[in-house]
Image (tube, rainbow, N blue to C red):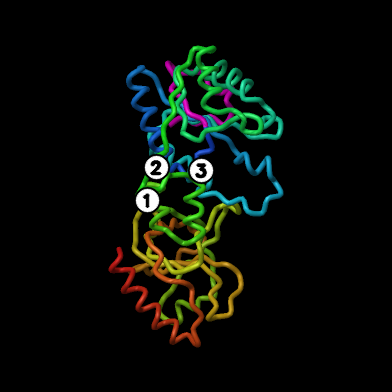
Amino acid sequence: MKIYNDIDTFKGVRNPVVTVGTFDGVHVGHQKIINRMAEEAIRLEGETVLITFYPHPRLVIHPDSKNLKFINTQKRKIELLEKAGIDHLIIIPFTKEFSKLTSYQFIKEYIVEKVQTRKLIIGYDHHFGKNRLGDYAILYDLGKKHHFDVEKIPAQDVENIAVSSTKIRKALNEGKIRIANNLLGYEYSISGKVISGQKIGRVIGFPTANIEIDDEYKLITANGVYACRVEYKGKIYQGMSNIGVRPTVNHSDLTIEVNIFNFDREIYGENIVIYFVDRIRDEIKFDDLDGLKGQLEKDRRTVKLLL
């Protein structure tokens, strides 16, 4: 996948099959759009082009909002788009000035003149331009005027739920990892650098790697204990993760830690990825460390059965 951080560096391709959006989740619905783009690119002997924005438009339009959290970091989104098979990724810097472009201006200047789109494929709820006034009807009319085809992909249903990033965020906020993963089409993950903790886990026989998130806008799933997989230097391990405030040891700050099974290495300062499989219980305050240790032994058995 070729990446362009400025649309002016994109020099054009033959018969571009294009889509536009933030693609925060790169979820099942997004994957359907991308797969359809690939089919059309083959038919038209063209290439796929995905146009997205950075930073996320909501960060520019609503900078004072304290609830802006996103499913994936920019780095992870790019990885997922590459894995999905996109040929060209154009990342448009989203600014206040850019946000003032009308629907017509965006289509004429970017979709028509800069990319020379042959076919545009969008999702069922796609809106664009100033105040998000652009929709499928406007795109269809503009397509006829500027000689490109437009196709709308209907909502994708998973277990009778219409897939959307909003529904995925809701599931994650409620700790419903299985639902979120089904809608995403892959396992929700958190990545970060391993930092030093209080080392209480080591005292009771459950050493953990505490991680520091490098993106303040990353959505962290609900507090609790999770069955997970951990990637370290390309190898996958089983483990169990705790997200919360560790009430048994009177900790107050949110921590993300993981006990990696059959792993005994010092990895401070190194990066790991935690892939969440299922939530097994709430975070609980125990009377003492012996009570916590006993519960963790039960949790480990539960997680091993799940994995």
Residue 162 versus residue 213 in the image, above or below: above
Tell me the number on the disc at residue 182: 1
**Of the two numbered discs 1 and 3 in the rendering, the one whose residue sits closer to the viewer:** 1
- Region in magenta: 1-20
Spatial CA distance of label 1 from label 3 is 16 Å
In three-dimensional space, the C-alpha distance between marks 2 and 3, rounded to whole angstroms, equals 12 Å
Q: Nearer the viewer, mark 2 or mark 3?
A: 2
* Contact between labelled residues 2 and 1, with CB atoms less than 8 Å apart: yes
Which amino acid type is shown beneath numbered disc 3? Asp
Image coordinates of residue 122 in percent, x first then y, are: 47, 30
State yes or no: residue 14 in magenta. yes
Judge the density around disc 3: few (<14), some (14-19), many (≥20) Cα neighbours within 10 Å.
Answer: some
First in sequence, mark 1 or 2: give its number.
Answer: 2
- Kindly check if marks 2 and 3 are in contact, taking CB atoms under 8 A apart as contact: no
Q: Secondary structure at mark 3?
A: loop
Residue occupied by mark 3: 24
Identified by mark 1, the residue type is Asn
Could you give the CA–CA distance between mark 1 and mark 2, rounded to whole angstroms? 8 Å
Give, as a three-letter code, the residue at label 2: Val
The part of the image, by quadrant, that contains residue 46 is top left
Please state if 102 lies on the left or on the right of 113 as rendered.
Answer: right
Quickly name the residue at label 2.
28
Relative to 213, is 32 above or below?
A: above
Magenta segment: does it hold 211? no
Residue drawn at (41%, 59%) of the image: 276
| Residue in the image at 50% along x and 35% along y | 125
Q: Secondary structure at mark 2?
A: helix
Label 1 packing within 10 angstroms: few (<14), some (14-19), many (20+)? some
The quarter in which the N terminus is drawn is: top left
